[in-house]
Amino acid sequence: ELEVAVLVLRSSGGDVRRELEVFMRVGRHHHLTRLLATTVNPEGMLCLLTEYAQLGSLDHVIGDCAEQETRVERAVLLAVASQVCEGMRALRLHGLVHRDLASRNVLVFGFDPRDAAKVLVKISDYGLTLKGGYGTGYVQPGLSTDGGAGRGPVRWSSPEVLMAQRFGEKSDVWAFGVLLWEIWSECRIPFCLQPDDGKVAELVCEERRVLER
């Protein structure tokens, strides 16, 4: 038997088409969540069947270790970071900009806090992913960045995203940097001492960008 995750596409909007297109475009990669099949439910809505990560998302896995006071070895954290990097590299080679890279959007298929060889993580959630020109190309989709504190992409967004809605390879690199901070800080919320997303955006754009240690 194969366990799968079922994503029900409840609308025919751009995000729905985009997610399906990305799945089809990237195909099979060891560090990207894979589309297994599509089907239609009794209500006539399209459903995507994807790989199922029994351990859940990276923020929960590392956060649970912190709550249980379980030490995660440095080699394990490095393995997680390396695998996310490989997945993002694959997206870039397909000319894609993820736009929402964060620990919450990394699924964990294998994890042992003391054994890096047992780590397997994959990037997921392609609902905001767009095609972008290879190299310096940027896209301007008009994404709103005023999500609730800790939930929206503001805390993972680069200055050019916050000020001009310009997304590209470099904004994904910025988000990867924030994700590295998450990994090494037990997956706390970035800028956790500032509850207001608007204030966080000001801090980033005014170049006072230091995340808490």
Image: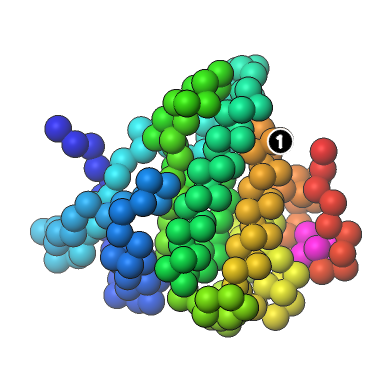
State the SS at label 1. Answer: loop
The reply, left or right, for residue 187 in relation to residue 109 is: right
Residue 154 in the image: state x and y as whole percent.
Answer: 67, 62
Hey, which quadrant is residue 16 in on the image? Answer: bottom left
If the image is split into quadrants, where does the N terminus sit? top left
Colour logic? rainbow
Residue 117 in the image: state x and y as whole percent.
Answer: 47, 26
Please tell me which residue lies in front, 92 or 160. Answer: 92
Residue 194 in the image: state x and y as whole percent.
Answer: 80, 50
The reply to whether residue 105 is visible in this rendering is no
If the image is split into quadrants, where does the C terminus sit? top right
The reply to whether residue 71 is visible in this rendering is yes
The reply, left or right, for residue 87 in relation to residue 138 is: left
Q: Residue at x 82, y 69 (%)?
A: 205
- Location of residue 134 with respect to 9 vertically, above or below: below
**Amino acid tagged 1:** Ser
Please tell me which residue lies in front, 197 or 94. Answer: 94
Main SS, magenta residues? helix
Residue 29 painted magenta: no
The reply, left or right, for residue 2 in relation to residue 110 is: left
Task: Read off the residue under disc 1.
Answer: 185
Please tell me which residue lies in front, 197 or 135. Answer: 135
Q: Which range of residues does the magenta coloring cover?
A: 200-204
Residue 95 in the image: state x and y as whole percent.
Answer: 46, 72
Hey, which quadrant is residue 193 in on the image? Answer: top right
Q: Residue at x 51, y 56 (%)?
A: 88
Q: Residue at x 31, y 41 (%)?
A: 52
